[in-house]
Amino acid sequence: MNGWQPVIGLEVHARLLTRSKLFSGASASYGAAPNTRACAVDLGLPGVLPVLNREAVRMAVRFGLAVGARIASRCIFARKNYFYPDLPKGYQISQYEEPITAGGTIGIESGGAERREVRLTRAHLEEDAGRSVHEGFGGASGIDLNRAGTPLLEIVTEPVINSAADAAQCMRTIHTLVRWLGICDGNMQEGSFRCDANVSVRRAGSGALGTRTEIKNVNSFRFVERAIGYEIDRQIDLVESGGEVVQETRLYDPDRHETRPMRDKEEADDYRYFPDPDLLPVIVDDAFVAEVRDGLPELPDARRERLVREYAVGAAEAAQLVSYREAADYFEAVVEEAGGPGTARLAANWVIGELTGALNREGLRIESAPVDAGRLGRLVRRIADGTISGRMAKTVFEEMWGSDGEPDAIIEIRGLRQVTDTAEIEQLVDAVLAAHPAQVGQYLEGAEKVLGFLVGQVMKRSRGKADPRQANRTLRDRLAERRSSPPPAV
Amino acid sequence: MNITHADVERVAKLARLHIAPADLDARARDLGRVLELFDRLGAIDTRDVEPLSHPLGATQRLRPDVVTEEVDRTALQRGAPQTEDGMYVVPRVIDPR
């Protein structure tokens, strides 16, 4: 890639979480039997008129405010004209001139690199098309129009991203944000969150943009990164070998790891946009904007900074905890139950480590974790106050996962209380020292690694119940005593 | 305004209209005349005129987000030439891979 700079812009489509469609009162729910969610308006039958869903407007404004965009006090809808069987009216109602939000930025951070700001061009409302099924209809295509008319927010970035990794990170950040705001469920398998990427390359230092290609509908972060990476390499190879990039739409094939031009040459790039005469200008007044602003949650960036500030959680842990709002909420509830910010690092380790691991194993989300934040908090409290060791806590946690048991009750029943009694530990240590004179000798001659073995012996004698930190400390003290006043030579 | 056969064929394709080759001359002439009228509109000085996106002075009413439509698929599909398993069936629109 030497001497070349990739230039990438993204178009993200986020399906808004409304109950009904953008312009009709049909249900916008996913997964119903074909065409049972497509009413006369969605089908574009003669004589119907679209009426705009207030909630979709509210969600678009919510997004706009969260990214610092300008909210248009007046916006209009346009018809984007093209023919395709899953578009019953022959046009898609979208926004072209005068979209609902303009500008704003997405801040991306990854791999320890400096924070980059990705400028947004706009975000606008539009309706989704239906779905075509090309298999199983004997050479014909089946059309399901349930999705037709569901509300989308199309989020468009400026062509300011310079690597495939940053493009994927930008997409992730937008994904986190729309879920955080509660305006999109982010489900990529169901197509609720999709991404197109415009990719071009130019000689480093050149101001002019190269010819771009558009990669359509990539539905995973990993594939976005790979598809763009492939496309960058393809374009550079092409230009370096004397060829020219053709402006076209390409599809990414993850199995072969390549992009290919869409064969569908019917696709016209002349959409003949014009204002939709069925829809009047939409006025978003100051009161509406103020109401949405008042309802905004603390945003991920602010939340992350606060977690670092208030709880002294590491930056990487904080970033992980704000990857979605429920995780951050869960974490803060654990800390509160465990006894406050002093337990935060322990709590963070448990949420990110043990809990997340168990959730991933069972394919569960944190909202439906069998161990709620209260119980995990009470477990963390017992680790923090020394009642049990981290290792014992894992046993307790496993038992909590499969039951409603409270940590204190499980600790009691299993007899897992940690031995922290100084006299008891000293007794154990002395017994171990007496039983292993050879290792003691090695330690005193400088083989400090032997200490680990001795700690292990103390733990073994206590059947795992001794506080390992205390055992370690006592062993060191006892051995230091011997070093300063060695037993008389025989 | 001079409209070529290629111009006519292009807009006809976008609008999915079939225009017989014999009619191309006439359609090009018609379109040219229509566009001349637009040129005349374009010549008007509109510097002090607010852009207009809708002829009515009203603004859009917003609808509460409530499901109000029961979908009677059987009734709605009565007008379709072909359906199968609840789907509308149309000629295949992509070329098979």
Image: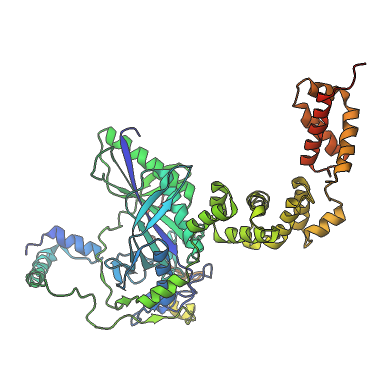
In the rendered image, the residue lying farthest to the front is: A485
In this view of the protein, which residue sits in the foreground, A178 or A188?
A: A178
Residue drawn at (33%, 42%), measured in percent from left and top? Answer: A6
Q: How many marks?
A: 0
Residue A77 appears in which quarter of the rendering?
bottom left
Q: Residue furthest right?
A: A490
- From the viewer's perspective, is residue A347 above or below residue A20? above
Q: Note whether A330 is above or below A229 in the view shown.
A: below
The answer to which quarter of the image holds residue A23 is: bottom left
**Which residue is at the far top?**
A490
Q: Is residue A454 left or right of residue A96?
A: right
- Give the residue drawn at x 80%, y 28%: A480
Q: Is residue A456 above or below residue A371?
A: above
Across and down, in percent, residue A236 comes to 32, 37
One can see residue B79 in this view:
no
Residue A189 higher or lower than B62, as above or below: above
Residue A341: % across, % down: 63, 55
Q: Is residue A392 visible in this depiction of the protein?
A: yes
- What is the x, y in percent for residue A225? 44, 45
Q: Residue at x 75, y 27 (%)?
A: A449
Whether residue A84 sits left or right of residue B57 in the image: it is: right
The residue nearer to you, when weighing A484 against A464, is A484
**Closer to the camera, B6 or A239?**
A239
Colouring: rainbow
**Which quadrant would residue A277 be assigned to in this image?**
bottom left
Estimate the x, y position of residue A483 in percent, counting from the top left: 81, 24
Query: Quick one: quadrant of the N terminus of chain B?
Result: bottom left
Residue A410 relative to residue A145: left or right: right
